[in-house]
């Protein structure tokens, strides 16, 4: 049963024995396939809370929404071997979670790393995918964007209060997100941090940062256009932040050219990644799901 928070917490076990977590909003509805939400590299299920409430409660045909915490993030257990923090292992965890929840297929929304996991699923379990929404991610990732992500994740100061945490996030990302309000920044920040010993702490295993410290960004990054071809059989909505440094406008245009059924949206005043609960994005996403 969904609690008065709008969701219930579900726990399941990965193939290698880790206890993993997902939030489930709403009830299964035979008239509408569920929505599966996959967050970014260090993010968690809380990123999707407002969008999940919208899709599970506020549209004409409500949908069940499942938002996952990857291993080492949110309420999922940390992995003793940081090498397992990779998209192939995480895709396997998502498959295990969907099996545990009895979900055979659904609409997938992937932000940043979540979109890369969707590319893996297209190659390993394509029947899971009824449609896909890619939020500021595609087959080509810009080195400048990855360098920015690595810089702020590895150098961010430790805040003493939530107000300090908001200031840290605004300093790191404010230039790319002039469209955000004070309420947006607070909500964004509260999804990143958890309260621990009276102060906010980033809600992921610090060992996760080892996966990005060794990236060589002085040479071109390999693209995954071949994997993108595996998504051409399902409807796609590709979203890009106007100020994104990770997904280039040219890549978004090429995605639309190569995919026979790809809608694109550019979000003004936001960078990487756009907040999916802001502006008209909830209605845009709900409309796309209703058509597919």
Image (cartoon, rainbow, N blue to C red):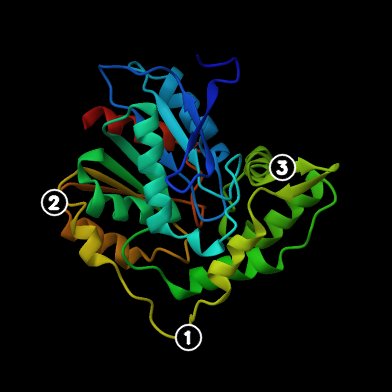
Q: Mark 3 falls on what kind of element? A: strand
On the image, the x and y values in percent for residue 140 come to: 34, 68
Q: Is residue 112 visible?
A: no
In the image, which disc is placed on residue 218? 1
Q: Nearer the viewer, mark 3 or mark 1?
A: 3
| The image quarter in which residue 128 lies | top left
Is 37 located above or below residue 61 in the figure? below
SS class of the residue under badge 1?
loop
Measured Cα–Cα span from mark 2 to mark 3: 42 Å
What is the C-alpha distance between the residues marked 3 and 1?
34 Å
Q: Residues within 10 Å of mark 1 (few under 14, many from 20)?
A: few
The answer to which of 277 and 65 lies nearer the viewer is 65
Could you say which is closer to the camera, residue 27 or residue 267?
A: 27
Disc 1, disc 2: CB below 8 Å? no
Instruction: Please name the residue shown 60% across and 65% down the image.
Output: 209
Q: Nearer the viewer's eye, disc 1 or disc 2?
A: 1
Q: Is residue 84 found left or right of 132 in the rendered image?
A: right
What label sits on residue 56 in the rendered view? Answer: none
Q: Residue at x 49, y 53 (%)?
A: 273
- x and y, in percent, of residue 46 in the image: 57, 37
Of circles 2 and 3, the one toward us is 3
**Of callouts 3 and 1, the N-terminal one:** 3
């Amino acid at each position: 049963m969904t609690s008065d928070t709008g969701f219930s917490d579900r726990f399941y076990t990965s193939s290698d024995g880790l206890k993993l977590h997902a939030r489930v909003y709403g009830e299964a509805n035979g008239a509408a396939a569920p929505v599966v939400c996959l967050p970014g590299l260090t993010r968690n299920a809380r990123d999707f809370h407002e969008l999940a409430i919208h899709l599970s409660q506020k549209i004409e045909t409500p949908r069940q929404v499942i938002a996952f915490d990857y291993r080492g993030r949110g309420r999922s257990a940390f992995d003793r071997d940081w090498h397992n923090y990779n998209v192939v292992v995480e895709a396997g965890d998502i498959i295990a979670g969907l099996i545990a929840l009895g979900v055979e297929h659904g609409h997938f929304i992937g932000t940043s790393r979540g979109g890369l996991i969707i590319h893996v699923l297209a190659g390993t379990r394509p029947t899971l995918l009824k449609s896909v929404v890619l939020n500021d991610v595609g087959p080509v990732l810009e080195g400048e964007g990855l360098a920015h992500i690595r810089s702020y994740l590895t150098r961010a100061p430790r805040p003493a209060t939530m107000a300090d945490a908001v200031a840290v996030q605004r300093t790191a990302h404010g230039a790319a997100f002039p469209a955000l309000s004070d309420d947006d920044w607070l909500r964004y920040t509260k999804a990143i941090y958890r309260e621990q010993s009276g102060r906010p702490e980033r809600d992921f295993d610090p060992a996760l940062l080892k996966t990005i410290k060794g990236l060589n960004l002085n040479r071109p990054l390999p693209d995954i256009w071949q994997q993108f071809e595996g998504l051409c059989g399902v409807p796609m909505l590709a979203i890009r932040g106007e100020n994104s440094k990770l997904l280039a406008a040219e890549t978004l245009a090429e995605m639309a050219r190569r995919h026979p059924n790809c809608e694109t949206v550019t979000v003004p005043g936001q960078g990487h990644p756009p907040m999916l609960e802001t502006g008209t994005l909830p209605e845009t996403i709900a409309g796309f799901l209703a058509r597919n």
